[in-house]
Amino acid sequence: MLFPSEVFLFVFLPLVLVIYYGLLRKNVALKNIFLLVASLFFYAWGEPQYVFLMIATILFDWFYGILLDKVRDKKIPARIIMFLMVATNLGILGYYKYSGFAVSQVNRFLHTEFAIPQVILPIGISFFTFQAMSYAIDVYRGHGKVQKNPLYVGLYVSLFPQLIAGPIVRYETVADQIENRVENWNDFTSGVTRFCVGLAKKVLISNNMALVADAAFALIINHDFQASMGMAWLGAISYTLQIFFDFSGYSDMAIGLGKMFGFHFEENFNYPYISRTVSEFWRRWHMSLQTWFRDYVYFPLGGSRVSKPRLIFNLFVVWALTGIWHGANWTFIAWGLMYFVLLTFEKLTGLTKKNYWWGHIYTMVFVIIGWVIFRAINLGDAIIYLKAMFGIGAKGFMDKAVFAYIAQNWVYYVFALVGCAPIIPWLDKKLENNKVWQAVYAVGLVAAMVISVSFISNNAYNPFIYFNF
């Protein structure tokens, strides 16, 4: 079940809210059980066969959490159990997400003919696997109490607002909120507002950017080179906007839904496209994933307080894993390794400590190039598209299609560019006591919500990026 769908907006969410605040208003334990059941139903709506996989993951990590809590002070048993916990989770993730890719690559390089497993990828498996691992690791580290009740571990892992598209919620962030959260009207209204903003980002901006990006990639990667260099750049920029407003829109909706039920999730995006270095970009983009790798991989490896060769190794491990996490394809691995090279360069040269005027241009050029690699079906297509962006094989510098797409979508581009910078929050803070601004903001929000719902009701183009994750 997707957030921007009629069944979620008009059936599932209203029904859950009515039961949660109506029938179960005064009983936290019953509200938790109800949210768990609702979350499992939410996942089972689209993945009925894989809801049992998620339940198994929950039970495994609940059990490992109890064991790790008991042997925390015993070094060798704790390491053995931690190894088994990691192996169990990564084994499940590896089989469902990477087994087909791994066998196909063995066949390719060793000229073997092993049968390639035909495994359907469970939606959101990378997100809920990392959250389940976070529970066991945080319990071991003493960052949140162990849950003797497996239903509460299940609620943490499967909570529907962040289940299929993040943010990745660390257990220590919500450990206390599971049993002791307090809902209030301010949080609820703030959550509704945040959800509406996220829905508009996804439906009005991201989906319309996707139409242009899809058209450009189809034109260029058909090997006929029927598009210009300008069209290649327009498509790449459109995808850059699409993925940001899609991903940040889903994060906004998740954070908003969490607030409606009394949960406070950490921010996942902080205007990454205003960054002046690649390092800054990754401090602002998908922050929950970056903090997960930082705290559970990078710091345990030694972080940056090591020799230069060791620092390079640590960065390589983190960014190779980041690429692999995103999907079973050489494009994701190449994308991750591209950032390893860039971030290593910035670390070793001290570029992150300087404020060059050209920093924003340099950062965004590489970010856009990276998104082309990320989106391409294979490395060959990525190379074809990148060559077209720099005039190799493209049909001229500019063509009429570029101006036609801009003319058709200029409103969405304007809103997208405004949304990439903290302009609205700045105005909101500057004019927080201005009744005219408050009225304009409220009317704009309602209008965006109404238009978004009309797009959804009319079955407008609504791609879902997270099948790879």
Image: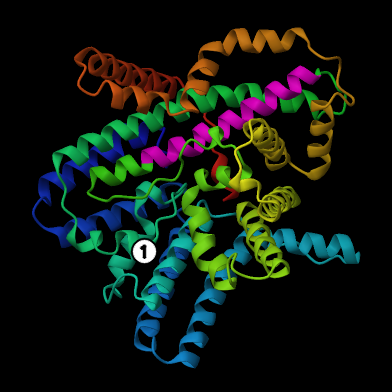
**Residue under numbered circle 1:** 171
Q: Nearer the viewer, residue 411 or 162?
A: 411
Q: Is residue 125 visible?
A: yes
Q: Residues within 10 Å of mark 1 (few under 14, many from 20)?
A: many
Relative vertical location of residue 98 with respect to residue 436 in this rendering, above or below: below
Pick the residue in front: 40 or 322: 322
In this image, 392 relative to 372: left or right? right
Query: Is residue 460 visible in the rendered structure shown here?
Result: no
How far from the left and from the top, in percent, is residue 441? 29, 19
368 part of magenta stretch? no
Q: How many marks?
A: 1
Magenta part, dominant SS: helix
What residue appears at the point 61 percent right and 52 percent down from the top-left corner?
Answer: 326
- Please state the horizontal and vertical placement of residue 407, each as a whole percent of the image: 61, 7
Q: Is residue 192 above or below residue 452?
A: below
Which quadrant holds residue 181?
A: bottom left
Q: Which contiguous range is marked in magenta?
A: 229-253
Q: Quadrant of residue 10?
A: top left
For this rendering, which residue is in front, 425 or 122? 425
Q: Is 239 in the magenta?
A: yes
Q: Position of residue 366 (x, y in %)?
A: 70, 38
**Residue 71 at what x, y percent from top left?**
39, 89
Q: Can you name the residue that lies furthest to the left here?
A: 26
Quadrant of the rendering where the N terminus is positioned:
top left
Q: Is residue 25 above or below residue 187?
A: below
Q: For residue 358, what is the image quadrant?
A: top right
